[in-house]
Image (cartoon, rainbow, N blue to C red):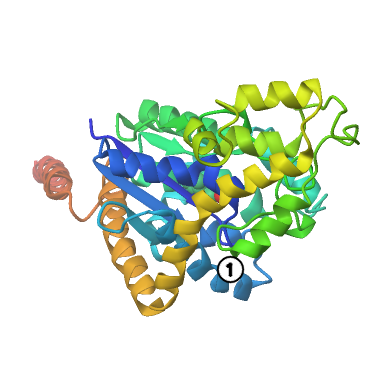
Amino acid sequence: MKKIILTGDRPTGRLHIGHYVGSLRRRVQLQNEGGFDEIYIMIADAQALTDNFDNPDKVRANIVEVALDYLSAGLDPAKSNLFIQSQIPELTELSFYYMNLVTVARLQRNPTVKAEIQMRKFENSIPVGFFTYPISQASDITAFKATTVPVGEDQEPMIEQTREIVRKFNSIYGETLVEPEILLPENEASMRLPGTDGQAKMSKSLGNCIYLSDDEETVRKKVMSMFTDPGHLQVSDPGKVEGNTVFTYLDAFCTPEHFAAYLPDYADLEELKAHYRRGGLGDVKVKKFLNNVLQETLGPIRARRREFEKDIPYVYEVLQKGSEAAEAKAAQTLSEVKSAMRINYFDDRELIMQQQEAFANRAAQAQARENGRRRGKKK
Ligand code: TRP
């Protein structure tokens, strides 16, 4: 069986470093290792509209931002299909059929959707489109026969829902769809990168994000004002590393090579943490180190972005070509789905001829009965 990746992001803002360690970094790595037969990276505008339907220009404006973030992070159109969800009508069609396989009660149990409904204060007026987006996400994944979906852990309920739909579909209509596996980030810090203020999540509305496209000075300022251990008042005080955002970011980003380059007094992060815990290590020194690490990671991304920004028509060309390739794949799957569901009328010659024969037989029998009756009357 082919190894296929599908994943994506809602275009509601520029991508930040939480997206980067949560999935983007891994996608680029998997792309470059070459172990997958096909890679599809989707800008999920239709899904973004499920809770931004009244703000289409926000979604529209962010298509190019997300595409620029993808390209500058190292996704290569020669190896990965970058495409826009709304341009693949097959995805919507699949969703309509999958809806038969999911109950309202099952959707209501989805913890991510539950949290989002609370956050958006939908209460009793949940838009149906939003409520059913996990089904549409199952279409996104299965349309490409994805085996692997690299995402953050908040997407786990969507992958589980997809797997259930696949099993149900295959058991009713015959083996057609592929059950995907989730691929989670490599460590705890990358899984749940907090905001720079220490809040559980990076979010634009909280203003606690470091964006991939932030300039050098902005990144430095954000790092220098980051939340650390509020009990660590003087350099000599022992400090806490757990829940200390600066150390969480180091967990997600730094490597022993970074120590050799910027902080050679320490062999690795464990030594640095031990010193912080003992006391005698100031926040400023750790923040400066983190700034160096982040600049080293983000510098090349930022530089590539500046280049791609000079040729926006090229960016749209990439998306258009990617969307064409994606649609070809989705159309193939939809055709298999429709055959399995017995709704492929016009390309089923056999069905048409069988029915023709059945009608002919019926007519012949009726004729025979009629003849018999006439002969009976004559007597
Ligand atoms: N739900 C994802 C997000 O919030 C975006 C998305 C839509 C997605 N369809 C997908 C991710 C399919 C992985 C696979 O960003």
Mark 1 is surrounded, within 10 Å at the Cα level, by few (under 14), some (14 to 19) or many (20 or more) other residues, namely many
Q: Position of residue 335 (x, y in %)?
A: 27, 49
Q: Position of residue 131 (x, y in %)?
A: 65, 48
109 with respect to 282 (left or right)? left
Q: Is residue 73 visible?
A: yes
Q: Position of residue 325 (x, y in %)?
A: 27, 59
Q: Is residue 110 visible?
A: no
- The residue at 13%/41% (across/down) is 365
Residue at label 1? 59
- Residue 247 found in image quarter: top right
In the image, 373 versus 179, the foreground residue is: 179
Question: Could you say whether the residue bearing mark 1 is in a helix, strand or loop?
Answer: helix
Question: Which quadrant of the rendered structure holds the C terminus?
Answer: top left
Count of numbered circles on the image: 1
- The residue at 10%/42% (across/down) is 368
316 with respect to 364 (left or right)? right
- The residue at 50%/30% (across/down) is 256
Query: Residue flagged by tag 1: what amino acid is it?
Result: Val
Question: Which quadrant of the rendered structure holds the N terminus?
Answer: top left
Q: Position of residue 144 (x, y in %)?
A: 33, 45
- The residue at 78%/22% (across/down) is 277
169 with respect to 207 (left or right)? left
